[in-house]
Image (cartoon, helix red, strand yellow):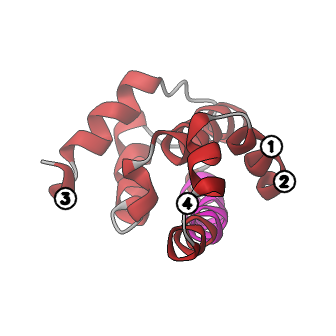
Amino acid sequence: MFCDALENHLQDTEFSIAIRRSSEPQEETAAQYLDQLEYLVTRIRREVLEKAGKDTTTEELLEGVKDIVVSFGGLSHPAYQNALDGYIISHSKSICGLVITKADLEQTWISMPRFS
């Protein structure tokens, strides 16, 4: 499933090496981010992508994603952000027929209140 693919992706990054070498509280945080990420992609799929279907614009889709992702602390870590970006890019095309770019997502993340 998505979580397994994400774990494989994270194992290939320097970030996961740092997590494995770190103390237990940070490992718990990494596990929490992974759980949150899995929950987020489920919500994004159901509440934004499937709900919007083919009758949406890029702006509407990104606003829906932003509303869900705003509380995700893992977004400040490149490995989690890349995994989330990849999911959104891939599934927005397959479910909604929209091409969302990495640049679109970067602008969305930057526009979020906690990253301004």
Mark 3 → mark 2, Cα distance in angstroms: 29 Å
Where does residue 71 sit, x and y in percent of width and height? 36, 69
- Asked whether disc 3 touches disc 2, contact meaning CB atoms under 8 Å apart, the reply is no
Looking at the image, is mark 3 or mark 2 earlier in the sequence? 2
Q: Is residue 48 above or below residue 43?
A: above
Apparent side of residue 53 relative to residue 25 in the rendered image (left or right): right
Looking at the image, is mark 1 or mark 3 earlier in the sequence? 1
In percent of the image, x 52 and y 71: which residue is there?
Answer: 29
Q: Is residue 55 above or below residue 68?
A: above
User: Which label number is shown at residue 114?
Assistant: 3
Residue carrying label 4: 22
User: Which label number is shown at residue 47?
Assistant: none
Of the pair 76 and 89, the residue shown nearer to us:
76
- Magenta part of the chain: 34-51
Residue carrying label 2: 4
Q: Residues within 10 Å of mark 3 (few under 14, many from 20)?
A: few
